Amino acid sequence: MTTASVAVAHRAPAAMCVDKHYTSLHSTGGPLVECNSKNIVMATPLDTFDIMIPEGMRSYLRAYGYNFNRKACEFAVKKMKRLNPATGKKEPIEAMGKEAVEELLQKHNIKLEHNEGHNFVYAANMIKADFWKSSIKDDASMALMIKDIIEDPDMPGGNLFRRWLADADASGMVIDWDDIL
């Protein structure tokens, strides 16, 4: 593995430690963070674009841009949980696959003009985990929300994937990029 380096991932005082295969976020008390004894880098919010990312992540982004491929979508969806109101505990969702989401959209005559890869599948599962039977009461509303997310003119191309990356960083999730290529 290569020597880790540090960069700030968000405006909040936090830093991302990265190496050849893994990405994870560590909260810090200030802008100086030590990932290992060999490489210490000062990082500020202005350094956001000067991140040394893992080679696996670089390869993923070259191949798919900021979009979900099948493996990345499955990885992200497996981590999704929904609060069970009866038990008060978080439970994994029953994931919707690509075919099920396509059937849902077709059933409600919804066509997506700007979808890339598995972004719409991730959106459907995110809705199921976060909004189902709360603000989204039925599958017709779910289909419309998928369209709203994918076709949002203020958030073109890849922003759903970027949001997931930000959430993964904030939670300290480790992503083995070689596994999702």
Image (spheres, grey):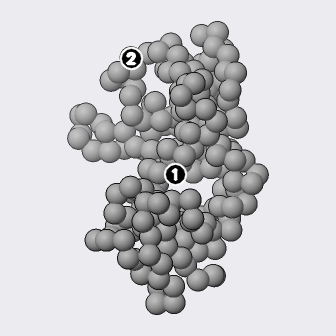
10 Å crowding of disc 1: few (<14), some (14-19), many (20+):
some
Dot 2 or dot 1: first in sequence order is 2
Q: Position of residue 158 (x, y in %)?
A: 62, 40
> Secondary structure under badge 1?
helix
10 Å crowding of disc 2: few (<14), some (14-19), many (20+):
few
Q: Residue furthest front?
A: 46
Q: Position of residue 49 (x, y in %)?
A: 56, 59
The residue nearer to you, when weighing 97 against 150, is 150
Amino acid type indicated by mark 2: Lys
The residue nearer to you, when weighing 67 against 134, is 67
Q: Residue furthest top?
A: 109
Indicate which disc residue 180 carries: none
Task: Tell me what residue is drawn at x 60 percent, y 10 percent.
Answer: 108
Question: Do labels 2 and 1 touch, CB within 8 Å?
Answer: no
Indicate which disc residue 165 carries: 1
- Asked if 111 appears above or below 26 in the picture, the reply is above
Q: Residue furthest bottom?
A: 37
The Cα atoms of the two marked residues, 2 and 1, are separated by 28 Å
Task: Tell me what residue is drawn at x 51 percent, y 90 percent.
Answer: 38
Residue 160 quadrant: top right
Q: Note whether residue 41 is visible.
A: yes
Residue 58 quadrant: bottom right
Q: Quadrant of the C terminus?
A: bottom right
Indicate which disc residue 137 carries: 2
Q: Note whether residue 16 is visible.
A: no
